[in-house]
Image (cartoon, coloured by chain):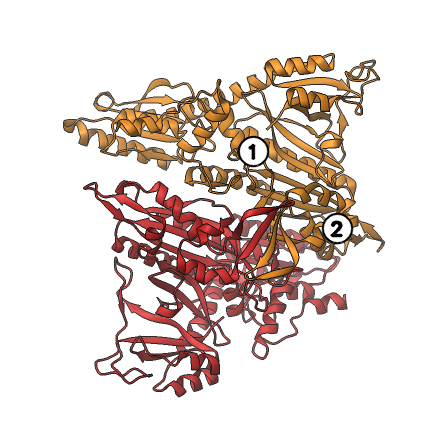
Chain colours: A red, B orange
Amino acid sequence: MSDESQELGITESKSHKPGEWYAEVVQKAGLADYAPMGGFIVTKPRGYALWERIQDALDGWFKQTGVDNVYFPMFIPESFLEREKDIVEGFDPEVAWVTHGGHNELDERLAVRPTSESIIAPFMADWTRSHRDLPLRINQWCSVVRWEATETKPFFRTKEFMWQEGHTAHATDGEAWEEVWTRLDQYARVYEEVLAIPVLRGKKPEHDKFPGADTTTTVEALMPDGKSVQGGTSHHLGQSFAEAFDITFADEDEEEQTAYTTSWGLSWRALGALIMTHSDDQGLVLPPTIAPTQIAIVPIWQEDTMDAVLEYSEAIADDLEAAGFRVELDDRDERNPGFKFNEHELNGVPLRLEIGPNEVDDGEVTLVHRPDNEQSVADRDEIVDAVDEHLETVFTKLYDTAAENLEENVRTADTPEEIMGTIGKHGGYVKVPWCGDSTEEDDIKEKVSAEIVMQPVVDKGGRSAGEPERPPEGTECVFCGEPADQYAYFAKSY
Amino acid sequence: MSDESQELGITESKSHKPGEWYAEVVQKAGLADYAPMGGFIVTKPRGYALWERIQDALDGWFKQTGVDNVYFPMFIPESFLEREKDIVEGFDPEVAWVTHGGHNELDERLAVRPTSESIIAPFMADWTRSHRDLPLRINQWCSVVRWEATETKPFFRTKEFMWQEGHTAHATDGEAWEEVWTRLDQYARVYEEVLAIPVLRGKKPEHDKFPGADTTTTVEALMPDGKSVQGGTSHHLGQSFAEAFDITFADEDEEEQTAYTTSWGLSWRALGALIMTHSDDQGLVLPPTIAPTQIAIVPIWQEDTMDAVLEYSEAIADDLEAAGFRVELDDRDERNPGFKFNEHELNGVPLRLEIGPNEVDDGEVTLVHRPDNEQSVADRDEIVDAVDEHLETVFTKLYDTAAENLEENVRTADTPEEIMGTIGKHGGYVKVPWCGDSTEEDDIKEKVSAEIVMQPVVDKGGRSAGEPERPPEGTECVFCGEPADQYAYFAKSY
């Protein structure tokens, strides 16, 4: 058993070696394994269950807001990919190409989809004839492939990744903007309400937009190691795809108009952010909102107390299940309680109930919750309320810690050197007034691997692009000294 | 409007031109479109919604019976595909090959998965150390690609198709058999309870097994055109994959043993069977169990009755939604009732409520249900019960028609010529006593495109292979005249 006990332990430290620690948590908590081909992973049951909960939440919100699911082919003919020039320039270097079907070479190479605008847009054109066909909102849950030559980091960096991609067409620019913000808000909601991670919402700078987009909006989450994660993006594509693929419609006066389109995606990178944000040196930590098992009940018995302890534990498990909690009664005989405690901690179970002969005699239950192993005792008769309260506490503790990390790590700077110095020392975000044009971003990127990850927007949520957050009158751009009319957030990022 | 009315009509006849009729229903009912690459389709919202209902049902049953969802890479290195010889022989001619990533040629070609045994088995080997790790049951919902050069038939024949593939490992042959039958029963249940299609269960003949399988079991559904659809297959893989990929475990005595594995899959071909079985020359017909919209309410008004009719209709829609039905109140102003009737019929809405001023005055509702447009009138106050009854009637009518088709179309034959004659004349199944060995199947296949699609099994469902259904003592094989100890079902198939 000593061997197996050791297997349970996380040996790396989150604060000292976050990269190695992350890889260890992912594997030891049974979330994913590395595939034989570099850049690919195998998503195991506990990892996939987390993705399914994100899917359930988002898919429900999508359907409530007029989105239908569809499925498009995983291949895109090369000639289709070439029809929107920014897409081909942006993705061509990272496309996986199918060249042979069986023993025959294909007449035209097929791209394994890196994103599906180029195969979806021509069908949108076909389905959109009249203003009555708009808005058109479709979504697919699938995987995409981008052949980037980087180190594999499960859920953060893989050549194939799972996501959803939504694609919409609208009659007006304003309706397209409303769509963009609706989806961005839903992404923020997944992070904040399901994953217990506060996020910043804003726009990507011009030079970091999605290929072909007019505007890319983003939710950004700050990791404990000081790096920002691009948590989900929602793109206003303007009329560039509509023009390239001829998405037009007859308006109410029977005049032909060009549509406005959007696309928006959230990938399993959300799982990476989840793991990275809350987990610790004991293993995975999950908010109860997403934990496949919310409560592990560990009965502790000797031979003479076994029947009483198990009976008492089973009754409690039944009560909790009836109340709608996801419960595991861990009555394995071949494992001792200490092993079980460690295993459930490793696997991210938010709450543990310990039940021994004393608890049975006293009509009580001992509760221990993550992340800090705070322990308390509750009356057997009030167990449902006690569990509910503990799980809420777990969520609050996790959210508050992440929120505190975010609040404490938005700093300002007056010079490019200060941006670099602050990020080099603290990580986090550095918010600077900017003219929107000149940067020394390349220099900053080279020296401290940081770049503009986000620009804050105010008055968003309506049928417009919103306004950039404005510095006070007379503020100068940190780079060029000209008047600054917007802010930029610099950070290192995943 | 005449143009659009015409668009709604199905112009081909199911009985005269089933192939053309099927293609027309699929497109006009908005289920799927043809992709620009031959062999691929685009699954549209109404088509994908049907697949989601099949997923929901099966996925729930899988989870109730110990199956966890996972996700494996969509690519399989060529060297992995080659490790199980039957798999490589079976699938190599139909593999789509990725040869380039970005601008670089890959060192090793990657197969787009035609099925995932070859990438899953090595991980099963890794995860299976002790008998405590068994049974191991995983499943993934994904698409696979098989480069077959045949005419595209949406949901029946496409190069890429959606399915689920389940993969399990067990300590004993008996447990593997139990698994095989459990999944086959769940497939039968999807057909019978969700799709309203009765099926036959049995084994595929030896020469038509899944590559690498010991036994392939199948559910077969008979289409109205007399052809059989292989509705889902569940394979006992014996120890061939376990040996090829080294899936071994330490038993209770710490002895190393080789596991037994199974795999099982159901594809969107189930949608093809659904469409083909119930639909008619008015369009798609769906059982209420799977229909995205179960009830269309069509208010019929003149200017002076509009308010009263709409208010009455809305209240009924609310009542039915509150009772859990999926309802669409079609209050579009720009379409007349006749157009709406046709459209909802085309789209497969099982039940239509017609509400005009007379219904309002009399406190009644007119109900018209598919497939036969039977009409009746119900009291407003009893609308929920009336709707419930009508939807049950729809299901029963559809199921009974399909069951009757099946019952009337299992025939027998005494000679090979009679097999061919009967299938040529009637289609359907021809059940013949067989020695299990000699056939003139090639000849039959060539002459009437029929082959052995199924062999009936008795006493299935337990921890064994079951027994073939036995002909009476002294029965002779229809081919060789030797004693027959089993039956074979011949049919044309999709």
Query: Quick one: which residue is furthest to the left in this view?
Result: B304
Q: Amino acid at mark 2?
A: Arg
Q: Quadrant of the N terminus of chain B?
A: top left
Vertical comparison of B23 with A118: above or below = above
**Circle 2/circle 1 CB separation < 8 Å:** no
User: Which residue appears at 32% of the width and 52% of the height?
Assistant: A243
Instruction: Name above or below for residue A482 compared with residue B132.
Output: below
Where is residue A323 shown, x and y percent of the image? 50, 50
Q: Quadrant of residue A157?
A: bottom right
Judge whether A267 appears above or below B258 on screen.
below
Circle 1: residue type = Val
Chain label for disc 1: B
Q: Earlier in the sequence, mark 2 or mark 1?
A: 2
Labels in figure, total: 2
Left or right position of A87 against A319: left
- The percent position of residue B83, horizontal first and vertical second, equals 75, 50
* Nearer the observer, B321 or B286: B286
Q: Secondary structure at mark 1?
A: helix
Q: Quadrant of residue B417?
A: top right
**The disc numbered 2 marks a residue on which chain?**
B
The quarter of the displayed image where residue A4 is located: bottom right
What residue does disc 1 label?
B190
Q: Position of residue B92 (x, y in %)?
A: 68, 45
Name the residue tied to disc 2: B83
Marks 2 and 1 on same chain: yes
Question: Percent from the top left, x then y, of residue B481?
Answer: 82, 15
Q: Please give left or right for residue A465 compared with residue B325 in the image.
A: left
